[in-house]
Image (cartoon, rainbow, N blue to C red):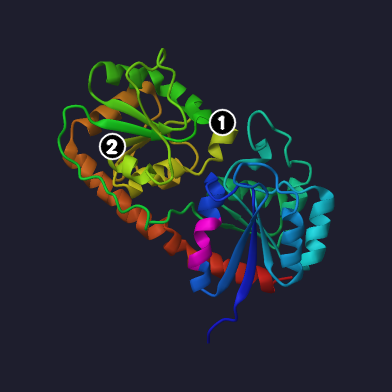
Amino acid sequence: MTAAPLDAVFYTRYAANGGSSRTRAFEYVEPLRIRGVNACIVSRVDESGEPDPGAFDRVCERGARGAVVVVQKPSLTFAQLDELLDASEGRLVVDFDDAIWMGYSPGDPADGLPSLEATLARARLVTTGSQHLAAWARQVTNSDVHVLPPSLDMRRYRCVRAHEQVASPVGCWVGTSGNFRDLEPVGGALRALMEAGVVRLRVICDRPLDRSEWPGAEWVPWSFEREVAELASCDLGVMPLRDNERTRGRCGYKALQYQAAGLPVVASPVGGAVDGVIDGETGILATTEDEWYAAIGRLAGDAALRARMGGDGRRRIAQRHSIEANAATLATLLRAAANSR
């Protein structure tokens, strides 16, 4: 028997190209539609990043017409929470993929926190991007909590690295310049490898690294259209992370992107990397600078190893971390939230 169509409205923190909103909402719209869930997006900000003053009212209107309301990275006031629950008759789902209890950025730690636990407690369903985040959520709510792994639209990842032996392989780092600090713990190892000509470092980002601190580091301006092709032009991906409460809440999206493009990964065993990288199979987990130096040097000198790990990683992403693989799970969870009390 075919399930009756379900309406859902995603109330996202960012617009279409805004990181987690794109990967946990916008990219799911069409796969959900195929599975009988008519999803629409209402962003809290417009494309320029300015707040949309009418967004909350539009979400309430959708909820009043029977839609399940999915609040992504919540920052509701208590009054808004009550209004939204009343309008939607309690059909509230909360989704997040960062340690949001720490605040949404180091410089704005209080944003959205006063009602955060109340929002989770009154949701019918909470979805998170990792087991670490789910464990925290279960401490503050009796709602159903499920892990919806970070997922990629594999239709974008058609450019795949064909590995071959090269004199100085390219190690890439993709992200926003606000996270350059993640490179600091392994900076000595990376600079030594670059100086020795073992590897070149390329950052795919909104701005380059400080050349006085990172001489020789290459820069490619990030763009949504070119991102995948740029990744596939590299030989291995790096994802160092400091170990603290905020980084433990990160879901390792960089590592998944590298693998989807056919690259092996060297990553810190922190946060989502623990689940997203299979040590010795799809990449290498490294903690100390000596371990980072050895791991990158090993991959740089062995094209066959890069090809094997990159291929295994891409297959694993397609099986476990693709939008197609996880859309059916999300559709089932949304239906359950619509029907529960």
Q: Nearer the viewer, residue 308 or 200?
A: 200
Residue type at tag 2: Cys
Is 140 rendered above or below residue 324?
Answer: above
Left/right placement of residue 106 relative to residue 140 reads left
Q: Tell me if residue 28 is in the magenta stretch.
A: yes
Is the residue under label 2 in contact with that under label 1 (CB below 8 Å)? no
Whole-percent x, y for residue 181 in the image = 50, 25
Q: Quadrant of residue 332?
A: bottom right
Q: Is residue 16 visible?
A: yes
Is 10 rendered above or below residue 77?
Answer: below
> Which residue has dot 2 on it?
234
Left/right placement of residue 335 relative to residue 255 reads right
Q: Nearer the viewer, residue 33 or 243?
A: 33
Q: Quadrant of residue 57?
A: bottom right
Upstream in sequence: badge 1 or badge 2: 2
> Which residue has dot 1 on it?
244
Whole-percent x, y for residue 185 in the image = 45, 22
Local crowd size for mark 1, using a 10 Å CA cut-off: few (<14), some (14–19), many (≥20): few
Local crowd size for mark 2, using a 10 Å CA cut-off: few (<14), some (14–19), many (≥20): many
Q: Quadrant of residue 340?
A: bottom right
Numbered circle sitting on residue 119: none
Residue at the spot 53% in from the left edge and 51% down from the top edge: 22
Which stretch appears magenta? 25-31
* Helix, strand or loop for disc 2: loop
Whole-percent x, y for residue 82 in the image = 83, 57
Of the residues tagged 1 and 2, which is closer to the observer? 2
Residue type at tag 1: Asn
Q: Residue furthest bottom?
A: 1
